[in-house]
């Protein structure tokens, strides 16, 4: 809304538009296709696309694919899926690799201006000559090569004359700059590797710092938004644009999203996948968008979360509980209510003589438009074992000998008898029902405090339910002692393999969201089969995490 105050990036854009610096803005989301997107990327996506939507403009999806060794087409596809699923549509799908020829030309231009040179030093030598933040670096003998020699050597690098690591192209800036990134940074390295898009056309690849800003400029990006760790790269970003005399994109930095009880670096997420701590990138415990989607989080909830955390200039750690709160809020509005019993105790209604009847139950009391469903009732039911106590304390409002409860959308029942096996285990509970107490037309005049969920034994369908907990035991995994994997929560998944569900659950689509009454929010998992439905718990009904 317009009254809402602008964040610092919005203020910059607002001023740039009002001053006439730009007529409209162009932003980009620039993932490297070396892994699946995570919730931190969602923050960047919502920010970049959100700005263009808010101020009028467009957002490109640009793959920063300059490292052939780690990048794959599978990742490109997953990234596109995730951005679309989050609800955003890019203006153009672009690749830094599309600009390899142009970037090569830019490098040649720098050489021609005497602003870049080919260095034969090894990476160790380059590192040693770089100096330290308090000590200037050393200018080596290659720095004074002639422009002609540099042009020839760079052409030879491209032509494949040299092996990996034999030569690099560096910018000639300032070996004593207080900013280490300005001490003749590398622009190109030799890599004889097949690129997922350009194949073997190239054996030299631009460094991130040389490709990124120039790609922004080629696309006329007005506001290039990245995370705080790129602040020291900004002088180099500006230097390249100035020396190449190309469109002046500007870089702005905001604090990356960090969240409790999880990790968000693709490198770490890849380790979790490769070492099988999780089942894959889309494991519902992962901080990936695909994991969260599989778990049942909604795009709306993720966007709301990104909106609520805002855009900060300083690093912070966001409580994952806030994300779960947003998910719960949205699901409460849209989830269909269903009954599922996880740990069954059989209840026999001894005075129920009909074969069965189909009762009406509302799909979602928060949404009258969602209508009703039919729920079968019969003589034998399952209730949750934990909803019965043989010896109940005072103020126990669930089922106990002599006590009455309401069965949700059905009748009031009274517990008459407890049946046990030879070892004394309770096998059944015998009850009577009050025929006049049917929900919606109750004339019994009886008031009960407890309402239980239940399913009819002969109509129940078998389901597997997967309950997820946090993947890590510590809040701040990134700053916890030792290896991050030392803090993995060994109990992050509990499987209930024999739950009993009401039959309506068989009829809905795969994307449907559910509230299992008194249990939590759930979604069907892709592992479901015709014989067995599998559900993921998206989030509990209330915040039950013990702090
Ligand atoms: P990672 O360290 O997880 O591998 P990355 O920054 O290397 O992430 P990129 O593919 O380069 O991953 O990221 C694409 C965009 O998303 C960049 O603009 C980056 O700044 C942004 N981004 C990445 N992680 C976060 C985060 N945690 N919070 C906000 N933005 C992020
Ligand atoms: Mg990156
Ligand atoms: Mg990375």
Image (cartoon, grey):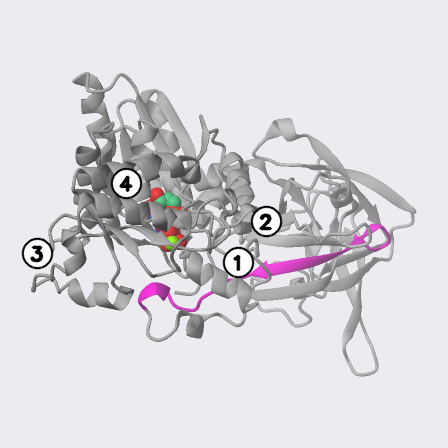
Q: CA separation, marks 4 and 1? A: 44 Å
Q: Which mark is residue 285?
A: 1
146 in relation to 11, above or below: below
The numbered mark, 3 or 4, whose residue comes first in the sequence reads 4
Quarter of the image that includes the C terminus: bottom left
Say which of 337 and 158 sits in front: 158
Q: Which mark is residue 107?
A: 4
Tag 2, which secondary structure? helix
The residue depicted at 47 percent of the width and 40 percent of the height is 301
The image's mark for residue 294 is: 2
Left or right of 407? Residue 88 is left
Q: Earlier in the sequence, mark 3 or mark 1?
A: 3
Label 3 packing within 10 angstroms: few (<14), some (14-19), many (20+): many
Q: Secondary structure at mark 1?
A: loop
Give the left or right position of residue 235, taking residue 528 as reference: left
Q: Which mark is residue 176?
A: 3
Mark 3 touches mark 1? (CB < 8 Å): no
Residue 49 falls inside the magenta stretch: no
Q: Height in image: 270 above or below 335?
A: below
Q: Position of residue 46 (x, y in %)?
A: 39, 36
**Mark positioned earlier in the residue sequence (4 or 1):** 4
Q: Tag 3, which secondary structure?
A: loop
Residue 518, image x, y percentages: 60, 52
In front of the other: 283 or 444: 283
């Amino acid at each position: 809304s317009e009254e809402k105050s602008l964040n610092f990036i919005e203020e910059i854009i607002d001023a740039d538009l009002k001053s006439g610096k730009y007529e409209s803005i162009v932003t980009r989301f620039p993932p490297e296709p070396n892994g699946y997107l995570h919730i931190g990327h969602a923050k960047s996506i919502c920010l970049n696309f959100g700005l263009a939507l808010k101020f009028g403009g467009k957002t490109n999806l640009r793959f920063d694919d300059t490292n052939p060794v780690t990048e794959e087409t599978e990742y490109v596809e997953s990234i596109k899926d995730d951005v679309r699923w989050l609800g955003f549509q890019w203006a153009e799908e672009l690749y830094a690799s599309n600009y390899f020829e142009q970037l090569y030309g830019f490098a040649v231009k720098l050489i021609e201006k005497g602003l870049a040179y080919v260095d034969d030093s090894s990476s160790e030598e380059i590192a040693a000559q770089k100096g330290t933040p308090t000590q200037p670096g050393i200018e080596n003998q290659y720095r004074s090569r002639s422009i002609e020699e540099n042009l020839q050597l760079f052409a030879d690098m491209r032509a494949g004359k040299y092996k990996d690591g034999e030569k690099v192209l560096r910018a000639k800036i300032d070996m004593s700059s207080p900013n280490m990134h300005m001490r003749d940074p590398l622009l190109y390295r030799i890599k004889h590797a097949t690129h997922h898009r350009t194949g073997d056309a190239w054996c030299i690849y631009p460094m991130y710092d040389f490709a990124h800003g120039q790609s922004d400029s080629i696309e006329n990006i007005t506001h290039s938004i990245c995370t705080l760790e790129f602040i020291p790269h900004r002088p180099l970003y500006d230097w390249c644009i100035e020396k190449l005399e190309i469109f002046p994109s500007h870089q702005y930095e905001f604090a990356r999203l960090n969240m409790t009880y999880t990790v968000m670096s693709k490198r770490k997420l890849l380790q979790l996948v490769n070492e099988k701590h999780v089942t894959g990138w889309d494991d519902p415990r992962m901080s990936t968008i695909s994991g969260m989607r599989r778990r049942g989080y909604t795009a709306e909830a993720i966007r709301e979360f990104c909106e609520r955390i805002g855009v900060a200039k300083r690093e912070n750690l966001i409580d994952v509980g806030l994300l779960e709160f947003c998910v719960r809020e949205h699901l409460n509005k849209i989830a269909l209510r269903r009954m599922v019993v996880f740990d069954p105790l059989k209840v026999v209604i001894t005075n129920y003589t009909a074969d069965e009847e189909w009762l009406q139950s509302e799909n979602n009391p928060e949404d009258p438009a969602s209508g009703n469903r039919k729920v079968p009732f019969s003589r034998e039911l399952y209730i949750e074992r934990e909803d019965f106590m043989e010896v109940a304390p005072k103020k126990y409002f669930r089922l106990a000998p002599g006590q009455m409860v309401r069965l949700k959308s059905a009748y009031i029942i009274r517990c008459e008898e407890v049946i046990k096996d030879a070892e004394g285990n309770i096998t059944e509970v015998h009850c009577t029902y009050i025929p006049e107490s049917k929900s919606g037309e109750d004339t019994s005049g009886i008031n009960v405090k407890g309402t239980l969920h239940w399913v009819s034994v002969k109509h129940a369908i078998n389901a597997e339910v997967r309950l997820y907990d946090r993947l890590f035991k510590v809040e701040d995994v990134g700053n916890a002692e030792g290896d991050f994997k030392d803090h993995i929560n060994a109990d992050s998944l509990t499987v209930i393999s024999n739950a009993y569900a009401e039959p309506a659950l068989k009829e809905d689509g795969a994307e449907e969201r559910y509230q299992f009454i008194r249990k939590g929010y759930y979604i069907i998992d892709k592992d479901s089969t015709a014989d067995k439905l599998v559900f993921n718990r998206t989030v509990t009904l209330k915040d039950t995490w013990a702090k």
